[in-house]
Amino acid sequence: MNGPTKKGQQTTWIDFPVPTTVKVDRLILQMGTDTEAQIALPLTGQADLSQYQAKQVRPNVRVPYGGTFWTLTTAIARLSDGGAQAEKGKRFLVLTLTIDNPSSQGTNGYPPDYLRLQFGGATISETSDTIPPTAAGTSHLIGLVAFLVPQEETSFTLVLLPSDLNGATSQATIPFQIP
């Protein structure tokens, strides 16, 4: 591995002035502000970073919702999403959903109006999504939805609320767990 060049601009290196008397293997690089989920990286060369790795499960649970079918294919828990670091004590839960619409009616609901996540007695709205409108007769449409959840929570239920714009008169739920 080579260090940064002496000329030009570097986008892959971060430099910190440190006295030559400091032993590098005793330093800890801490990323994140006081209000964000922080990552502490001991510069020992043997740091166990597994606690910071994203955790993923593949529930592959399919439920009917109005005239459509929604499948929760993957759930990923991670400390950042979309260029944002999670708040202190929280993590992002990013769900990948596949939507099939075999009906003759398209749907055009606004995802923040009908998507919720339940855990530990709380119900929250999403932080972002890429859920597409579903035209009649379409299949395998893929969308993502992100929620900001407490780090210690492991049991969740995705809730699809009743929605006239989606043709759903009752809610659908998908329970799942992630470490």
Image: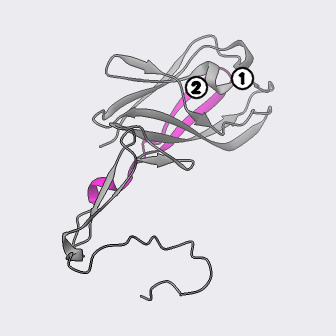
Q: Closer to the camera: disc 1 or disc 2? A: 1
Q: Is residue 67 magenta?
A: yes
- Name the one closer to the observer, 71 or 10: 10
> Residue 21: x, y in percent?
20, 79
Residue of label 2: 64
Disc 1 to disc 2: CB gap under 8 Å: no
Q: Three-letter amino acid code at disc 1?
A: Gly
> Residue 122: x, y in percent?
38, 18
Q: Residue at x 36, y 44 (%)?
A: 37
> Which region is colored magenta?
50-75
Q: Is residue 135 above or below residue 86?
A: above
Q: Residues within 10 Å of mark 1 (few under 14, many from 20)?
A: some
Q: What's the CA distance linking mark 1 and mark 2?
A: 16 Å
Instruction: Tell me the quarter of the picture where residue 15 sits.
Output: bottom left
The quadrant of the rendering that contains the C terminus is top left
Instruction: Tell me the quarter of the picture where residue 68 sits.
Output: top right
For this view, does 96 lie left or right of residue 38?
right
Residue of label 1: 109
